[in-house]
Amino acid sequence: MKLKPNMKSDFDEFLKEEDMLVDAEAETTAIKRVIAYQIEQEMKVQQITKTKMMNTSRAVVDRLLNPQNHSMTLQTLESATSALGKRLNIAIV
């Protein structure tokens, strides 16, 4: 397919030129915000307190629920979801 002069071959390049490309930091924060929200909502539904959450310190749970704190491990996520009686599902798309 021949590209017209106004067409771009790279969608990311197009988004960048239009100032619509999300940087990695913003995307990481968005993902963490969703994870923290989902865990917090499930804790409310099940009436689970932070101290009962993962059989660990409140500080660990606070870091997990803090959308600005990106330092979480798969083990921490697995422990959190297990404490909620849920499964952790991660996909690469």
Image (cartoon, rainbow, N blue to C red):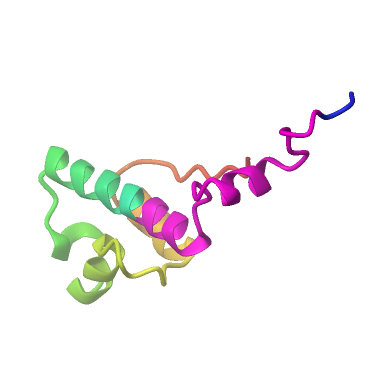
Give the vertical position of 70 relative to 78 (above or below).
below
**Quadrant where the N terminus is found in the figure:** top right
> Toward which corner of the image does residue 65 lie, by quadrant?
bottom left
Q: Is residue 89 left or right of residue 77?
A: right
At a point 11% along the width and 56% down the height, the residue shown is: 49
> Toward which corner of the image does residue 90 lie, by quadrant?
top right
> Toward which corner of the image does residue 92 lie, by quadrant?
top right
Instruction: Please provide percent x and percent y for residue 66.
Output: 25, 64
**Quadrant where the C terminus is found in the figure:** top right
Q: Is residue 70 magenta?
A: no
Closer to the camera, 11 or 36? Answer: 11
At a point 71% along the width and 33% down the height, the residue shown is: 6
At a point 65% along the width and 46% down the height, the residue shown is: 12
Q: Is residue 71 left or right of residue 60?
A: right
Q: Is residue 22 magenta?
A: yes
Q: Which residue range is magenta in the image? A: 4-32
Instruction: Please provide percent x and percent y for residue 77.
Output: 41, 58
